[in-house]
């Protein structure tokens, strides 16, 4: 990874960022899904207008992070901040954009009294796991379960 230092501006996401999120998600996931991202961003904006973020590099959106604060779910009584989706434009990768997004979200949620940040990482994405470990995340006692539903 390069160690180049980049000026990153973090701000709350808004509706005008949808096309940039679609562009970044197409690069990171390989699929063009404008309706899906419009639905998701509007959902997060309704839940918490200040709780999801974008990063700008040279005035252009270079990454996004969607999350919110939940309490009482999964038997966890303490308010937990959840990082649910992250995407950084690969053209800006390795320059601290993801770290800047995560640290800003931690600061915002900490200021609201949140004392635990959580996320889930699929075992097929070891690079995302490394990213979160570098940010200080560690394995949690919470374990995911799934039951497949037949047609
Ligand atoms: C993972 C991701 C967020 C990293 O973003 P980034 O801006 O390149 O990360 P940063 O430059 O801020 O790196 C932060 C730390 O994570 C580490 N890191 C980042 N990407 C890494 C990778 N692919 N492999 C290993 N470590 C990585 C860096 O070494 C760095 O460590 P340090 O700060 O302690 O030196 C970005 O590559 C991405 O969006 N990937 C696709 C996301 C995705 O598929 N999301 C779907 C599930 S939500």
Image: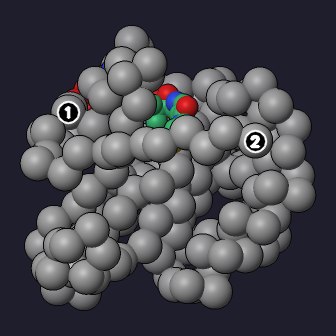
Ligand 1 sits in quadrant: top left
Residue 122 sits in quarter: top left
* Above or below 28: residue 68: below
Q: Which color scheme is applied?
A: one colour
Q: Secondary structure at mark 1?
A: helix
Q: Secondary structure at mark 2?
A: loop
**Mark closest to the chain's N terminus, 2 or 1:** 1
Residue at position x 35%, y 44% from top?
Answer: 145
43 or 142, which is in the foreground? 142
Q: Quadrant of the C terminus?
A: top right
141 on left or right of 145 = left
* Above or below 2: residue 52: below
Judged from this view, the residue extending furthest toward the front is: 150
Judged from this view, the residue extending furthest toward the top is: 1
> Residue tagged by mark 2?
151
Residue 84 is tagged as none
Return the x and y of residue 28 as percentages of the image width and height.
66, 29
Residue count near mark 1 (Cα–Cα under 10 Å), binned few <14, some 14–19, many ≥20: few
149 or 98, which is in the foreground? 149
Residue 133 is tagged as 1
60 or 66, which is in the foreground? 66
Return the x and y of residue 19 as percentages of the image width and height.
85, 55
93 on left or right of 39 = left
* Above or below 121: residue 16: below
Residue at position x 77%, y 25% from top?
Answer: 30
Count of numbered badges drawn on the protein? 2
Residue count near mark 2 (Cα–Cα under 10 Å), binned few <14, some 14–19, many ≥20: few
151 on left or right of 1 = right
Disc 2 to disc 1, how far (Cα)? 38 Å
Residue at position x 80%, y 55% from top?
Answer: 36
31 on left or right of 98 = right
């Amino acid at each position: 990874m390069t160690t180049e230092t980049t000026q990153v501006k973090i701000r709350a996401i808004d509706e005008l960022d949808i096309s940039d999120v679609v562009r970044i998600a197409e690069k990171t996931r390989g699929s063009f899904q404008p309706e899906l991202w419009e639905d998701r961003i509007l959902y997060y904006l309704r839940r918490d207008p200040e709780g999801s973020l974008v990063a700008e590099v040279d005035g252009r959106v270079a990454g996004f992070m969607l999350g919110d604060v939940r309490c009482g779910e999964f038997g966890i009584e303490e308010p937990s901040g959840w990082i649910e989706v992250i995407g950084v434009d690969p053209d800006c990768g390795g320059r601290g954009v993801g770290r800047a997004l995560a640290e800003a979200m931690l600061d915002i949620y900490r200021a609201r009294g949140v004392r635990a940040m959580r996320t889930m990482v699929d075992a097929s994405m070891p690079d995302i796991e490394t990213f979160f470990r570098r940010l200080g995340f560690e394995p949690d006692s919470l374990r995911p379960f799934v039951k497949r539903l037949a047609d």
